[in-house]
Amino acid sequence: MALWFCSARLFIFLFILSALPIAYIIYQERAETDHHVFHYYSSGFFRESAKWDYESRRFLVTFLEGGVGEIHVPQNYTCDIVLKEVTVVKDSDLTGNASLGLALDNPRNRLLVAVADMFGNRYSALAAYDLSTWKRLFLTKLSGSGDEKSLADDVAVDADGNAYVTDVKGSKLWKVGVDGEILSTLTNPLFTPKEWYKSLAGLSGIVYHPDGYLIVIHTLACSCRRKPLWEIGGEHRWVGDGFCGGKV
């Protein structure tokens, strides 16, 4: 009886503990704010990343359960209008994997999406989609069940169309060419802090700067560094969560 009672108390404690972040999210959703907020109907609960597509007047969001959604903002938009999310990408062959970071590559009219096995860390990939037809242009496998555990978290694209994908589990970067070929895997001791607990989650958010370098953030080390692209080749590279940038 005592064992059952202890287990019941533990269950209640865990239930309350798990309810706290959900309650906080609901509170934040309903709180009044001075900032402009876009409200929209969604088919799911968790949305991982979002980007504003200036040319098409829409937000593009990734689904934690896998997929991409589009939220169109009409020209006559006013604050009292509630927008609607429309699913534009849902790949059956990627079922069970999450769609995480995304990057707009407007010069090539495509969207790049980091795909990963969130819980098993046994699959990571980079997918590219045509922004007009949503046809998948390529799917590049970055790691699989026979490799070390990894989690493709975010992606950035440079002026030439090369993509850079962060591995939040293995603290490394993958460089993928414009046609989907893996060009190199970028590692450096700076990517791994000395403290073991700061290595539980590594490189996360990444953006490309027009001046020719990447900015990457380390999740737990709270460090942010940059490196010129011409220094990114075989093994010499650099070192929150995400970044925001773009035209409005």
Image (spheres, helix red, strand yellow):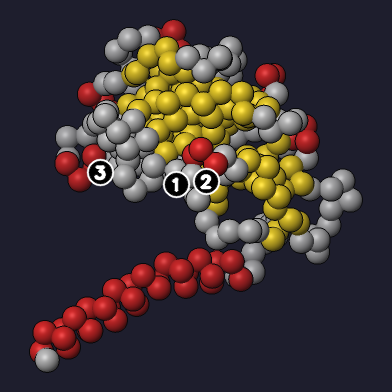
Circles 3 and 1 in contact, beta carbons < 8 Å:
no
Residue at position x 70%, y 24% from top?
109
Image check: 222 left or right of 130? left
From the image, which quarter does the C terminus lie in?
Answer: top right
User: What residue type is disc 3 on?
Assistant: Leu
From the image, which quarter does the N terminus lie in?
Answer: bottom left
Q: Quadrant of residue 3?
A: bottom left
Q: Which mark is residue 66?
A: 2
User: What residue type is disc 1 on?
Assistant: Gly
Residue at position x 62%, y 28% from top?
136
In primary-sequence order, the first of circles 2 and 1 is 2
User: What residue type is disc 2 on?
Assistant: Gly
Query: How far apart are the two marked residues, 3 and 2, measured between alpha carbons?
Result: 23 Å
Question: Is the residue marked by circle 1 packed among few (<14), some (14-19), or many (20+) residues within 10 Å?
Answer: some
Which mark is nearer the camera, 3 or 2?
Answer: 2
Mark 3: which secondary structure? loop
Is residue 23 positioned above or below 196 on the image?
A: below
Query: How far apart are the two marked residues, 2 and 1, measured between alpha carbons?
Result: 7 Å
Q: Foreground: 221 or 38?
A: 38
Circles 2 and 1 in contact, beta carbons < 8 Å:
yes
Q: Quadrant of residue 125?
A: top left
Residue at the farthest front position: 93
Q: Foreground: 95 or 195?
A: 95
Question: Could you tell me residue 175's position as x and y percent?
Answer: 43, 18
Question: Could you tell me residue 158's position as x and y percent?
Answer: 55, 18
Residue picked out by circle 3: 200
Residue picked out by circle 1: 96
